[in-house]
Image (tube, helix red, strand yellow):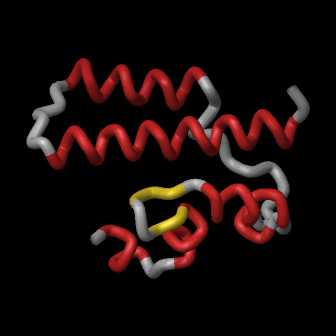
């Protein structure tokens, strides 16, 4: 797996984890410390906390990322691409 494929995998995994957590919260699932540590462990295991090395290159402007992020749906009417373009307060809703 090359670096771009690995980055795509990490992005997909992170977004799926977030969606899963949001669905559980909507169903009023109560997360305990162990649940939270398990989720954090997944993020750590797959390097989802890592910062970009090249700060001059914006990941959200990368053509391949833009194409894939338009395909990943956060909900039926909102793509990941649209979500990251929202202001933080709008995205939180």
Query: Is the residue 64 above or below the residue 1 in the image?
Result: below
Q: Residue at x 73, y 65 (%)?
A: 66
Q: Is residue 90 left or right of residue 14?
A: left
Which corner quadrant holds the C terminus?
Answer: bottom left
The percent coordinates of residue 54 (x first, y second) are 84, 56
Q: Is residue 8 left or right of residue 54?
A: left
The percent coordinates of residue 14 (x first, y second) are 53, 40
Q: Residue at x 84, y 66 (%)?
A: 63
The percent coordinates of residue 36 (x first, y second) are 29, 29
Query: Is the residue 38 above or below the residue 4 in the image?
Result: above
Query: Is the residue 22 above or below the residue 58 in the image?
Result: above
Q: Residue at x 43, y 37 (%)?
A: 17
Which corner quadrant holds the N terminus?
Answer: top right
Q: Is residue 58 left or right of residue 84?
A: right
Tell me which corner region of the image, top left, top right, bottom left or bottom right, holds residue 88: bottom left
The percent coordinates of residue 64 (x first, y second) are 82, 58
* Number of numbered discs visible in the structure rendering: 0
Q: Nearer the viewer, residue 37 or 84?
A: 84
Tell me which corner region of the image, top left, top right, bottom left or bottom right, holds residue 48: top right
Query: Is the residue 1 above or below the residue 4 in the image?
Result: above
Tell me which corner region of the image, top left, top right, bottom left or bottom right, holds residue 23: top left
Which residue reaches farthest right? 2
């Amino acid at each position: 797996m090359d670096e771009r494929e690995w980055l795509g995998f990490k992005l997909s995994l992170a977004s799926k984890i977030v969606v899963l957590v949001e669905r559980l919260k909507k169903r009023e699932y109560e997360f305990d410390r162990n649940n939270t540590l398990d989720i954090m462990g997944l993020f750590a295991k797959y390097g989802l906390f890592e910062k970009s090395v090249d700060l001059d290159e914006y990941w959200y402007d990368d053509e391949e990322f833009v194409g894939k992020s338009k395909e990943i749906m956060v909900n039926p009417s909102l793509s990941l691409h649209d979500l990251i373009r929202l202001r933080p307060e709008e995205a939180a809703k």
